[in-house]
Amino acid sequence: MASVAHRRPAKESFQIHEDARTDEISDLDESTERHTQRAEEDEGAYDDPLAGEEIEEGDNEENHDDEDAETESSDDDEHIDLSVREDMEKLNNTFPNFKDNYRLIKRIGEGTFSTVYKAEDIRYHHYHNHWDLDAKECQWTPPPLGVASNSRSNSQSRHTRRRPKFVAIKKIYVTSSPSRIFNELELLHDLRDSHSVCPLVTAFRQSDQVVAILPYFRHQDFRKYYPNMTVMDMRIYFRSLFTALAAVHAQGIIHRDIKPTNFLYDPEKKRGVLVDFGLAEREGIDNKPCLCHEDPQVRRQRLKQSVAFTSAHAGPQPGYPKNDTRPSRRANRAGTRGFRAPEVLFKCTEQTTKIDVWSAGVILLTILCRRFPFFNSADDVEAMIEIATIFGSRRMKQAGQLHGCMFDTNIPTIGAAGFSFEKIMLWSTCRSDPSNKDAAKGQGQLTDQEKGALEFLRLCMELDPSKRVSAEDALRHPFLSLDGDEEPEGEGEEDDVMMV
Ligand SMILES: Nc1ncnc2c1ncn2[C@@H]1O[C@H](COP(=O)(O)OP(=O)(O)OP(=O)(O)O)[C@@H](O)[C@H]1O
Ligand SMILES: [Mg+2]
């Protein structure tokens, strides 16, 4: 069994090494603990916004496993599908020493690239576990309050009893390419000390099967909590998400798949972690020059030489060349439909970390409008139509031209000016409807708090990535700063549409 070691000195490069099995250490005394660390992995690439949400055993409604060890036994009592049992058995058989390290409990997620199981980390206490957020929180114990000696010994025995510790085991489908798996492991390794990013504990490989071990993070299903989130809840949620994004982006890494199922959030603890770096990549890798990084004048010049421009000025009937000799455009489109930024749809070849900010904006729009999924397109063209309906054809044309693309449509529902987020929010929450009781009572208006949220949303869902707020700046915005005493930021000027 090969494994990936984690949490070594920062300068040390990431490498997979043989993990010769060491026999159990029976002495659990802290002083004899090995200082070995473990790390994890995963992989991804797909398209369904709801993917990964069909959680087999309702695990997201997890009981408070960290609070009380006894509640954990209930996990074992849950009915587990026969096929899941068989899969867990297979996993145990694939990795000969697995059973000594992990007790598989149940399946908690099934994505496009992996199946995720919850397991007890049997040998947790044999390792240093810097990744354990809960352990860090529990380091402080209240001072004794002069209680009777027998009650003190009771409390001591309570504290010395070890609670089971849980991990999420991500079994990556063997169809994933080795380079993709390695990429994810490597990025997670680089992000090991990043705030709000679920760290890699360790990873194992047996032949073509790779599993990543992650700390198990208790969270709730987004669909359960988003309909009731207050604006303050949203601010806390997005502070946590943008903290993760800022940390990831500071390392020059683009996550590429920001969506609710990849941000595990616990509304009670008001804490979230970013998972699933299966599609993540380093900014700038494989980039080819895109017009969006050119000077506006150069862009204008180049657009004048374009086939679309020439065709539009050739006669009354614009069209496509019969023999189109232009090379097809290739760009990374990885991500989930409904969450792809406009520059991804326009096949920008110099994508940046700002694509994650757009996707985070889509989550905010979803929560504010109480509609999930908010966008529901079958393909990229439909996705463009959805975005154009909101932003209007005029701004969509500008957005396309930034990347050397011509956007045109004769769909009657797409107006030139589009609609404001205010209108969309009022419509989708049925507050602009006079037959709605609340609207009739004069409550069909947005509150100041909601207006503040929309102002932040506009910064995240800015069509031009160079004008879109960065995760780092977003954290300084009053919506996320949580002290509410800063001035809102102004909106940038818009470029003129170059009519072709
Ligand atoms: N550390 C964790 N703690 C608890 N649950 C987890 C953890 N990691 C993953 N999960 C669960 O497993 C699901 C799938 O995980 P992940 O997104 O990493 O896999 P994936 O195969 O890339 O999925 P998808 O294709 O849906 O994005 C998550 O949405 C979550 O419910
Ligand atoms: Mg996922």
Image (spheres, rainbow, N blue to C red):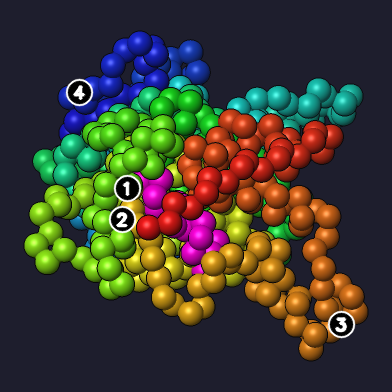
Q: Which residue is mark 4?
A: 17
Mark 4 vs 2, N-terminal side: 4
The answer to whether mark 1 and mark 3 are in CB contact below 8 A is no
Q: Where in the figure is residue 291, as x and y percent of width and height?
A: 34, 39
Mark 1 vs 3, N-terminal side: 1
Q: Which quarter of the image is occupied by the N terminus?
A: top left
Determine which of the numbered discs, if any, sits on residue 309 in the image.
Answer: 2
* Nearer to us: label 3 or label 2: 2
Q: Which element carries disc 3, helix, strand or loop?
A: helix
Circle 4 Cα neighbour tier, 10 Å, few/some/many (<14 / 14–19 / ≥20): few
Q: Is residue 447 left or right of residue 114?
A: right
Q: Which residue is mark 1?
A: 304
**Looking at the image, which is closer to me, 414 or 36?**
414
184 is higher (above) or lower (below) than 48: above
Specify start and end residues of the magenta stretch as a single range.
389-403
The answer to whether mark 3 and mark 4 are in CB contact below 8 A is no
Q: Which quarter of the image is occupied by the C terminus?
A: bottom left
Q: Which residue is mark 3?
A: 440
In 3D space, how far apart are the residues under numbered discs 4 and 2 (Cα atoms)? Answer: 56 Å
Mark 2 vs 1, N-terminal side: 1
In 3D space, how far apart are the residues under numbered discs 3 and 4 (Cα atoms)? Answer: 67 Å
Q: Which element carries disc 4, helix, strand or loop?
A: strand
Mark 1 vs 4, N-terminal side: 4
Q: What secondary structure characterizes most of the magenta part?
A: helix
Mark 3 vs 2, N-terminal side: 2
Asked whether residue 350 appears in the rendered view, the answer is yes
Q: Is residue 296 left or right of residue 157?
A: left
Please name the amino acid that badge 3 sits on.
Ala
Please name the amino acid that badge 4 sits on.
His
Query: Which residue is depicted at the point 45% across and 22% down?
Result: 128
The answer to whether mark 4 and mark 2 are in CB contact below 8 A is no
